[in-house]
Amino acid sequence: MTLKPLSTYRLQITSRFTLDEAAAVTDYVAALGADWVYLSPLLAAVSGSDHGYDVVDHSRVDPERGGPEGLRRFSSAARIAGLGILIDIVPNHMGVAAPRQNSWWWDVLRLGQESGHARAFDIDWRLGGGRVRLPILGSAADEVVANREITVDPTPADDAPDGTLSYFEHVLPLAPGTGALADDLPALLAAQHYELRYWEDQAAELDYRRFFAVSELAGIRVELPDVFAESHREILRWLRDGLADGLRVDHPDGLADPGAYLERLADGTGCAYTLVEKILEPGEELPSWWRTDGTTGYEALALLDRLFVDAEGAQALTGLDARLRAETGLPAAQPWLDLVHDTKRKIADDLLQSEVRRLVRVLPQGVVGAADALAELLACFPVYRSYLPAGREHLRQAAAEAARRRPDLAEAIDELEPLLADPALEVAERFQQTSGAVMAKGVEDTAFYRFTRLGTLTEVGGDPSQAAVPASEFHAAQQARLSAWPHSMTTLSTHDTKRSEDVRARLSVLSELPERWAQVLGELRAVPASGHGPFDSLFWQAAAGAWPIASDRLLAYAVKAAREAAEATGWQHPDAGFEQRLAEMADAANGAASGILTRFVDEIAGFGWSNALSAKLLQLTGPGVPDVYQGSELWDLSLVDPDNRRPVDFAARARMLDTLDAEFARGILPPIDGSGRAKLLVTSRALRLRRDHPELFRTYRPLVVAGQASEHALAVDRGGVTVVATRLPAGLARIGGWQDALLMRPDLPATDVLTGRRFGPGPIALAELLEQYPVALLEDAR
């Protein structure tokens, strides 16, 4: 076992797939070839949580996920299987949807600022007059009181000596000495350390920091040494007691000072392997001074995806988008940067207005037009955040762009810029925390659902304005990763991706066949349509990318996508008519449109499989630590969460792997078909080779492919292993295949690990090398 993983396999631990059930699959994970197992958050979360990011108790492993004994049993099983353990942790926030389950939050609600946990939460006590605002009411407070929707139970309880009050499912503690006011509800409510507010007030009137715009997740002040100690005591014990080997840090950009946090974490863990869930914009570098081994790999995902997109075809899809807009009476599409500006500005003005108002309140001096100027600066900020004093150039860029767009705010922007650049000021600290939230909500959760021409391009970490990358750019990025962050994670699918790797691989084929897709989309829209042309494209891409897909899954995706886009419907005020049309489209997918979809997917599935196998092999053998998301060793045609968190049949996969190994030993290779056995072959062989011979993966040298079809191949020497992958397979088929293409290589014999075939020294014809599969993994004779 190594101190740093060679590869990882992500498991989602829930009440339906507990640590004991995870322990039962460790042998399979090891047989697949993974080096470490990578677990979703384990600390006690809100009951019923299917993700674990809403931690309510830092002191214990979630009993619904197996509890401390379950973790011990899992760790033992993983050690026996020879696996290391990486665990996801959540330092930025806690779950407060069910206050009684979170003893810290419950105590703050009962005692207010006198609570020993009051300083743990990032609450602006001045705004609420010493009270925490809780946006849980379905109507105004006076209406709720008049309708007697709040009930009071003065019966003492261990955690509520003065009793509780209830509003539907919400139960809250009564402040000391206030139980006697039970017969005077307005007086009782006024005497509490919390203020019940209408749910829509959270956008503008909230007084505590949230995770993005989720009021059920309250930010904590982990920058305080005692809060860090109390929230990390159990986590550090896992490493000290050998129950875990490394940590994945969720959302470090929400922290007041991510660099200082990572320093404290490294000191506490003895410099254990640590990754950060940090999204880098194209061209942005991970802070070099952070004590981390790298990111969770979204930048690698975006780069790999773009190897399989045809740049000219993507332009044709942009033309199709323009026609769809014109047909349905929509304005012309905005350039990407303008779209992003406007969606970020909308988020700053609406969902995150509370955060902008807090920035105004902590300004050290009055600035005329501060709220408007701050929102504009947030909308123009080019990356997720800065890390002052580093990153001032991003603030300068944002200020220049904001003044260009809003010259009427130039004076306010000039006043604000030096304040936001001063790391000693609270407003500068909070601006850094807020800019990431505005970026995430404005881009990932809004603009990505409005930019619908090709779903492959709108994945976390990607820039849709960059449709494709040339091989030279891909190679340069891989060499840079090997040099600077050799232990950073790489990924293709996660619990947060908007489409699984195999859906994106299939959708990339549309860029090679834009005219055909336009024809098919026209046929599909003639069956049912939403009335919003670009969204029709997004919908039918989801259907084609994940086909076959049940109508309920497709509808769930469509409703979420449409509400996130916030054009024709939305989360706060859904449009029932539009969403009814979505339901009709989802029904039609498995009805009147089924034949159209089936025929088209039959045309492109083979090209999608080629893209998927090629991307997977490049990821698994490339620089960094490749992660395999649970179940994605077979074809995984999943859409955005919760679709991508469905249960995985590990027993079936274990049986399939056993059969594959037995047949491979007899020279029987799986075909590339809907079973996914070919992907299992590629995944297992690449992982096993990397685990058993890490010395073969220590360099990165691009190899030359000669011949007319050379642009359709990408080849790399990793230091004893040659990796070959196919690009743009539809275009390759159009020119008649590999023809005279040759892989130029040294005079060394080699064996293709994927097929067992042996090749002599020197160049190899790609038509021969890639006869069976669109990929090859050549191990040089030693």
Image (cartoon, rainbow, N blue to C red):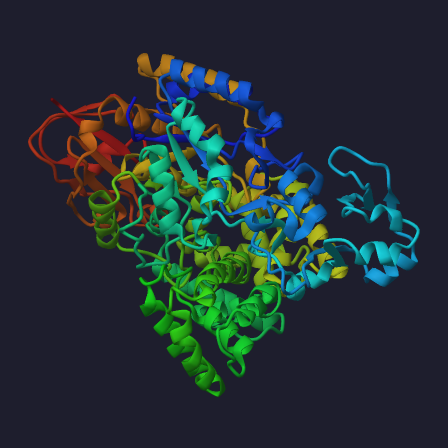
Q: Residue 522's quadrant in the figure?
A: bottom right
Q: Position of residue 196 (x, y in %)?
A: 76, 56
Image-based side of 672 in relation to 230, left or right: left
**Residue occupying the point 16% across, 41% down:** 742
Total label count? 0
Q: Residue 713's quadrant in the figure?
A: top left
Return the residue nearer the eye: 778 or 304. 304
| Residue 632 seen in render | no
Image-based side of 144 in relation to 559, left or right: right
Quarter of the image that includes the C terminus: top left
Quarter of the image that includes the N terminus: top left
Image-based side of 576 in relation to 764, left or right: right
Say above or below: 756 vs 584.
above
Q: Residue 578's quadrant in the figure?
A: bottom right
Return the residue nearer the eye: 205 or 88. 205
Say above or below: 23 vs 628.
above
Q: Position of residue 553 (x, y in %)?
A: 64, 42
Q: Position of residue 114 (x, y in %)?
A: 65, 49
**Residue occupying the point 21% across, 33% down:** 697
| Residue 660 seen in render | yes
**Residue occupying the point 37% across, 16% down:** 661
Furthest toward the left, the residue is: 747
